[in-house]
Amino acid sequence: MFVFSFKASSLKIIGLVCVCLVAVVAVISLLPQTGAYLNVNKLDISKTLSSIDVKKEDGRQEYLSTLGYTATEEPVSKTSEKIPEVFDATTEKYNELQRVQGFDLERYGGKKVTGYTYEISSLPDGTKLSDDKYLATLIVYKNKVVAADLCCPGRQEYYPLVRVS
């Protein structure tokens, strides 16, 4: 059995802690951005988006094209649902995805919303999609998009549709 001991002054200990903090900050700043984003716009276009009339089909198309997506001319599905007043674990997880984009469904608990789902043929960076099918969903309350997502049903993955700065 070996026993090591050393004597360090408080100045040496403070210096060592400072060096460690600088090293941690440097490593974190060098890490690549991670997260659930899949080729989403990084522009702050929330004011432009909020002025679009999404009650009408051409408005929803404009909303998607403003974000850089190419979508089918008509929704592949249209649903009407009521946002639950109390969120379960699944709804809370989905709402976390919405909060990343600047949305929050808790404000609309108990309200009836309409979901419009479109098939996406290209992403904002111009990538044409052929192998995997992607669906963009806009959830609308009155004349306002209150939630949105990009889904790959084959992979059972959901992504933010837009990143609001």
Image (cartoon, rainbow, N blue to C red):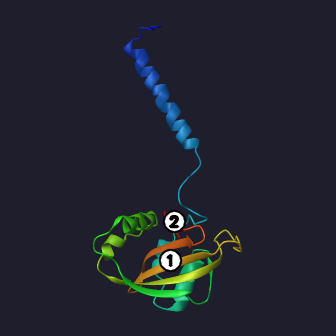
Q: Quadrant of residue 94?
A: bottom left
Mark closer to the observer (2, 1) = 2
Residue 157: percent from left, percent from top: 54, 66
Residue 158 percent coordinates (x, y): 52, 67
* Residue 26 appears in the picture as rendered: yes
Out of 128 and 12, give the one closest to the viewer: 128
Mark 2 secondary-structure assignment: loop
Residue drawn at the location 32% of the way across and 69% of the way down: 87
Mark 2 is on which residue type? Answer: Arg
Indicate left or right for 134 with 129 as reference.
left
Tag 1, which secondary structure? helix
Q: Does 121 sit left or right of 55 as displayed?
A: right
The image quarter in which residue 37 lies: bottom right
Q: Residue at x 55, y 90 (%)?
A: 58
Q: Residue at x 69, y 73 (%)?
A: 129
Instruction: State the residue position of label 2.
Output: 163
Residue 54, can we see it?
no
Mark 2 residue crowding within 10 angstroms, few (<14) / some (14–19) / many (20+): many
Q: Is residue 112 above or below residue 67?
A: below
* Residue at image location 60% in from the left, 81% down from the top: 119
Location of residue 19 with respect to 115 vertically, above or below: above
Q: Position of residue 21 (x, y in %)?
A: 47, 31
Q: CA–CA distance between discs 2 and 1? A: 14 Å
Q: Which mark is residue 48?
A: 1
For marks 2 and 1, the one nearer the N-term is 1
Mark 2 touches mark 1? (CB < 8 Å): no
**Residue closer to the observer: 109 or 163:** 109
Please, which residue is most extreme toward the front here?
Answer: 1
